[in-house]
Amino acid sequence: MTDVLEWVRFIVAAVFIIAGMLIFAVSVTGVYRFKFVLNRMHSESIGDTLGISCVLIGLIILYGLSFAALKLVLIIIFFWISGPVSSHLLTRLEVNNNEHITEELSDDTKEDL
């Protein structure tokens, strides 16, 4: 019975890790394919936050209840707090310093600036 539970835990962890890697792959593809810097920042920030979380959740499942799993939970919390904040600050820096930003934006977003 314990062998079956170990396999189930391994499969669930593998699904999370593979999902995280796929999210990273889509994020990197978006960074290289998008031409506008704000689109690239959006793609990177989603991949960063969600991809790292999925991979770390998979590792937490593999480790089980241990001190290492607690450390991984703290890393997830840190990334969920710092990742969006740093992406937002970099995006605001681009908006404030790019002189040609209104040429690259759509009509709907020009009103927000």
Image (cartoon, grey):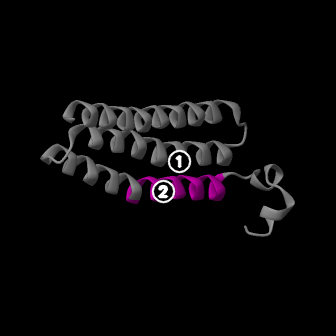
Report helix, strand or loop for mark 1.
helix
Query: In the rendered image of this protein, does residue 77 appear above or below residue 31?
Result: below
Q: Main secondary structure of the magenta part?
A: helix
Which residue is the extreme one toward the front? Answer: 1
Q: Quadrant of the C terminus?
A: bottom right
The residue lying toward the viewer, choosing from 35 and 102, is: 35
Q: CA distance from mark 1 to mark 2?
A: 7 Å
Locate residue 98 relative to residue 47 in the image: left or right: right
Tell me where residue 112 appears, x and y as whole percent.
74, 69
Q: Earlier in the sequence, mark 1 or mark 2?
A: 1
Locate residue 35 relative to residue 32 in the image: left or right: right
Q: What are the residue bounds of the magenta stretch?
A: 81-97
Tell me where residue 51 appears, x and y as whole percent.
46, 41
Q: Quadrant of the N terminus?
A: top left
Report helix, strand or loop for mark 2.
helix
Query: Which mark, by number, is residue 95?
Result: none
